[in-house]
Image (cartoon, rainbow, N blue to C red):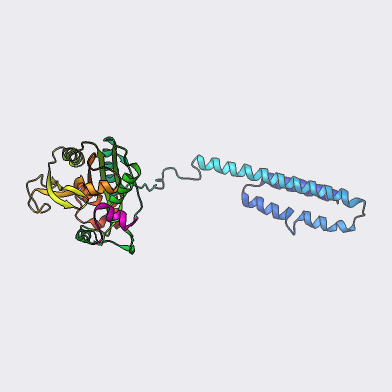
């Protein structure tokens, strides 16, 4: 029986050495080591051996099995390496065929514009502040000089979660939260990018949109500082030839307040359909921080002043890239997004 085992080892070794592929090696494995393999058949006859011979034959059988396993493993590794070499030489792959294209993503136009705005104001020494999108009525309205019965709330009709909890209508609550944390320290210079929510939905409005608001508080800040900052920003955003104008307006949380217009980016201020033939486009709202807002947040309005402004990122994006329908910014149409 020992001779049979040695013969099986030799035969298997010769067959393994001649094997030309992995499938052939697998067939050899089954032939010699499988449940019905030659080694198994020999071992089934061990019952006829004497008690003294069984340990010795069992040891030889284990040596033969290990030998065949090692030879199979070595040959398998060699054949795989040879196959890899053939592929690298081009014998397994046609290197003249075009490669598989790798799809590359890009930044959304709203992200591009938001980052441009942030970069500009960071360069002026502002920092970025963030806050919750689910706000309390106090921070969203009351702390900004909008009590519960104030008619100006109608301009910011929003989504209420409960009587005192809502989806914020602007990022101004973050300004209040920042002032509460920093008062009475000076200066305060922040911009607040983020999503806001209002009950609007048409070609130029969305129930969810992006805003960037700014706040600066210090001693002796004037309206001239506000005008100079925004004029520089808008010329940076829309080009050095851009003209700006400030129109008196009303916002409960600023006094005085102003709407800011820019010369039409389509016609250069000559008048066209986009600007309703006025030569001007409304771009953002601004004003000096209302004394009540300063007092509520912990600042002495007799000693400090500040300015604030807010802009819709979608509005700026549409004007910057000539987009005539806001809804395409949210439709995830790759034909549109690939343009950026």
Q: Nearer the viewer, residue 75 or 208?
A: 208
Q: Nearer the viewer, residue 269 or 331?
A: 269
- Which residue is found at the position 90% from the left and 51% from the top? 53
Residue 283 is left or right of residue 53, and the answer is left
x%, y% of residue 142?
Answer: 27, 55
Q: Which residues are magenta?
A: 134-148
Whether residue 206 is situated above or below residue 180 in the rendered picture:
below
- Which residue is found at the position 19% from the left and 50% from the top? 322
Q: How many marks?
A: 0
- Which residue is found at the position 62% from the left and 49% from the top? 22
- The answer to whether residue 330 is seen in the rendering is yes
x%, y% of residue 169?
Answer: 27, 56
Whether residue 207 is situated above or below residue 261 in the rendered picture:
below
Residue 15 is left or right of residue 318, and the answer is right
Q: Nearer the viewer, residue 114 or 88?
A: 114
x%, y% of residue 304?
Answer: 24, 39
- The question of residue 136 being in magenta is answered with yes
x%, y% of residue 293?
Answer: 25, 48
């Amino acid at each position: 029986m020992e001779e049979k085992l040695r013969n099986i080892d030799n035969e298997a070794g010769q067959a393994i050495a001649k094997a030309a592929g992995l499938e052939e090696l697998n067939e050899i494995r089954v032939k010699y080591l499988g449940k019905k393999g030659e080694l198994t058949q020999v071992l089934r006859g061990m019952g006829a051996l004497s008690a003294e011979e069984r340990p010795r034959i069992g040891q030889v059988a284990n040596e033969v099995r290990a030998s065949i396993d090692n030879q199979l493993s070595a040959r398998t590794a060699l054949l795989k390496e040879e196959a890899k070499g053939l592929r690298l030489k081009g014998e397994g792959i046609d290197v003249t065929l075009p490669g598989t294209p790798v799809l590359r993503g890009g930044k959304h136009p709203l992200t591009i514009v938001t980052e441009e705005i942030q970069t500009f104001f960071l360069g002026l020494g502002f920092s970025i502040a963030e806050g919750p999108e689910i706000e309390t009525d106090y921070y969203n309205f009351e702390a900004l000089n909008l009590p519960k019965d104030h008619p100006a709330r109608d301009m910011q009709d929003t989504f209420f979660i409960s009587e005192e909890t809502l989806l914020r209508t602007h990022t101004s609550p973050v300004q209040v939260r920042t002032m509460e944390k920093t008062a009475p320290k000076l200066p305060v210079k922040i911009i607040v990018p983020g999503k806001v929510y209002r009950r609007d939905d048409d070609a130029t409005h969305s129930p969810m949109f992006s805003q960037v608001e700014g706040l600066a508080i210090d001693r002796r800040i004037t309206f001239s500082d506000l005008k100079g900052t925004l004029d520089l920003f808008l010329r940076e955003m829309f080009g050095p030839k851009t003209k700006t104008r400030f129109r008196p307006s009303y916002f409960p949380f600023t006094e005085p307040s102003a709407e800011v217009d820019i010369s039409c980016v389509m016609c250069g201020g000559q008048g066209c359909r986009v600007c309703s033939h006025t030569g001007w486009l409304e771009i953002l709202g601004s004003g000096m921080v209302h004394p009540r807002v300063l007092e509520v947040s912990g600042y002495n309005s007799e000693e400090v002043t500040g300015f604030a402004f807010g802009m819709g990122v979608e509005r700026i994006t549409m004007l910057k890239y000539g987009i005539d329908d806001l809804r395409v910014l949210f439709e995830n149409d790759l034909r549109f997004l690939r343009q950026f």
